[in-house]
Image (spheres, grey):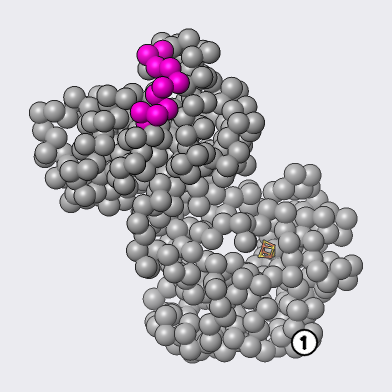
């Protein structure tokens, strides 16, 4: 667990900082203590330098912008030489309190963006009552800069601009407040590879500690709320946000975190990642753009043999379900799929599902694939994403051309007829016709599932 945004060097911790850091060392993998002006940033650097698990950022908060001119850039540059300084910020725009004039805030923010670009450091963004202006900054002035939206407030326009630009979205204590349903709803639209957690300690204590001084270890409350809301386990969100924090701030990663996963656990299901190959190019697909999904690197650099999967699966009977899924299309490796699925069944798997694009007949040029999987696989989740050929081709872009939609349809009907559980699924892309998709599923007599764009 990493608290990606706290102010441990603030005076609120002067009386017991040693004890607070001790607790952080016991319960967290790291804390990033965030600087707000030049003097404050120096304190953050000093604290990080003397504590192994604390990292610092250096920057000028929009409230402090009024006290600086362009010379601050060189001062910050010097501080950024320290290897424990992992980002610039917090920097940004705050038109709620307007402590610094708007023009001055923009000038100092721009300087810090330039520095982030030059030094290839991420920038921690503070934004309040300035979503329109910040979205504009992100879209027009932050090319080549990576960022973190600190203490995200739920603004949709800002979220869209930030996600389009590859930024990370950081949730703090407010996501635990009962009345903040609108903020929690945005969790469903943030891909698992972009979500971070923070405390903003000593401020913004989560609901359970509201009214008290915040503490970096309270980030666990935020984590718990997010896990519950997304229907994931605590350990899933812990893994996801820890790996994301390391990716966002270029912190050292373990070999386990870095290496591509052949099998991986989510909730109490085991997923089998056979390949990165796929004959489609879906408009919403992250394959090839993001290596990490749900806190795992799924970008295989080779095609492992069946025994490597068996060795890692070990005891499939302990999972609710074993799912052939991963980052590519399982039918691309039909022989390995069949061998591993048969072994998994024999070893006591309760349920086996294949998530497929439904193009198995065209990929394998084999009409008997369903016969071979009979008695082994229980469910096919067929990602068809449309209910008509007109809708299908622009979204899925299959390399097999015009016969693809008919082939997916035949596979779906054959699987249903052969007695498999069949679910057709779609991602809600622009122009997707939900009602037509549901009617289509009902006509086929299969279950349906519609997901929003994100990966989880
Ligand atoms: S079928 Fe799945 S893996 Fe293939 S491009 Fe579409 S979303 Fe990506």
Find disc 1 in the rendering and name its residue. Answer: 366
* Residue 131 locus on image (x, y percent): 56, 24
Relative to 394, say whether 350 is above or below: below
Q: Nearer the viewer, residue 402 or 19?
A: 19
In the displayed structure, would residue 249 be above or below residue 346?
Answer: above
Rendered image quadrant of residue 170: top left
Residue 107 vs residue 422: left or right? left
Q: Is residue 419 left or right of residue 150?
A: right
- For residue 407, side relative to residue 26 (left or right): right
Decide if residue 438 is on the left or right side of residue 141.
right
- Quadrant showing the C terminus: bottom right
The residue closer to the viewer here, 146 or 118, is 118
In the rendered image, residue 452, in percent from the top left (x then y), is placed at: 63, 48
* Image x and y of residue 234, in percent: 36, 53
Ligand 1 visible in quadrant: bottom right
Q: Quick check: is 72 in the magenta stretch?
A: yes
Q: Residue at x 36, y 52 (%)?
A: 251
**Residue 327 visible in this rendered orientation of the protein:** yes
**What residue sits 72% from the left and 48% below the top?**
429
Q: Give the magenta range.
A: 65-76
Q: Say what secondary structure mark 1 lies in.
A: loop
Could you tell me residue 417's position as x and y percent?
Answer: 75, 78
> Which residue is pictured at 66% across the width and 84% down the height?
334
Say whether residue 180 is visible.
Answer: no
């Amino acid at each position: 667990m990493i608290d990606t945004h706290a102010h441990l060097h603030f005076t609120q911790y002067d009386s017991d900082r040693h004890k607070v850091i001790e607790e952080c060392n016991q319960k967290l993998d790291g804390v990033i203590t965030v600087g707000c002006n030049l003097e404050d940033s120096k304190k953050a650097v000093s604290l990080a330098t003397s504590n192994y698990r604390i990292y610092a950022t250096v920057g000028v908060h929009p409230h402090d912008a009024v006290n600086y001119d362009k010379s601050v850039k060189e001062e910050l540059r010097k501080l950024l030489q320290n290897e424990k300084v992992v980002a610039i910020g917090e920097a940004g725009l705050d038109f709620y309190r307007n402590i610094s004039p708007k023009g001055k805030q923009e000038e100092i923010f721009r300087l810090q963006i330039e520095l982030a670009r030059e030094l290839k450091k991420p920038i921690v963004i503070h934004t309040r009552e300035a979503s329109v202006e910040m979205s504009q900054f992100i879209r027009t002035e932050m090319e080549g800069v990576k960022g973190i939206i600190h203490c995200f407030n739920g603004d949709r326009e800002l979220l869209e601009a930030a996600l389009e630009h590859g930024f990370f979205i950081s949730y703090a204590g407010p996501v635990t407040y009962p009345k903040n349903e609108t903020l929690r709803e945005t969790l469903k639209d943030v891909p698992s590879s972009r979500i971070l957690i923070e405390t903003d300690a000593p401020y913004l204590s989560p609901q359970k500690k509201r009214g008290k001084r915040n503490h970096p270890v309270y980030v666990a409350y935020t984590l718990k709320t997010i896990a519950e809301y997304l229907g994931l386990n605590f350990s899933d969100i812990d893994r996801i946000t820890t790996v994301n924090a390391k990716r966002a701030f270029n912190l050292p990663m373990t070999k386990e975190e870095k290496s591509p996963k052949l099998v991986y656990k989510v909730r109490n299901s085991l997923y089998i990642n056979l390949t990165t190959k796929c004959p489609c190019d879906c408009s919403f697909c992250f394959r090839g753009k993001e290596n990490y999904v749900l806190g795992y690197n799924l970008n295989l650099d080779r095609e492992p043999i069946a025994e490597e999967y068996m060795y890692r699966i070990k005891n499939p009977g302990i999972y609710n379900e074993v799912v052939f899924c991963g980052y590519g299309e399982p039918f691309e490796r039909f022989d390995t799929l069949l061998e591993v699925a048969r072994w998994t069944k024999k070893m006591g798997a309760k349920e086996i599902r294949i998530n497929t694009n439904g193009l198995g007949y065209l990929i394998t040029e084999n009409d008997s694939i369903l016969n071979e999987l009979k008695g082994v696989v229980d469910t096919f989740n067929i990602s068809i994403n449309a209910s008509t050929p007109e809708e299908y081709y622009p979204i899925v872009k299959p390399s097999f051309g015009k016969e693809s939609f008919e082939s997916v349809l035949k596979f779906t009907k054959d699987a249903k007829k052969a007695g498999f559980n069949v679910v057709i699924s779609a991602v809600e892309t622009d122009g997707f016709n939900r009602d037509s998709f549901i009617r289509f599923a009902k006509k086929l007599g299969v279950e349906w599932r519609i997901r929003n764009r994100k990966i989880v």
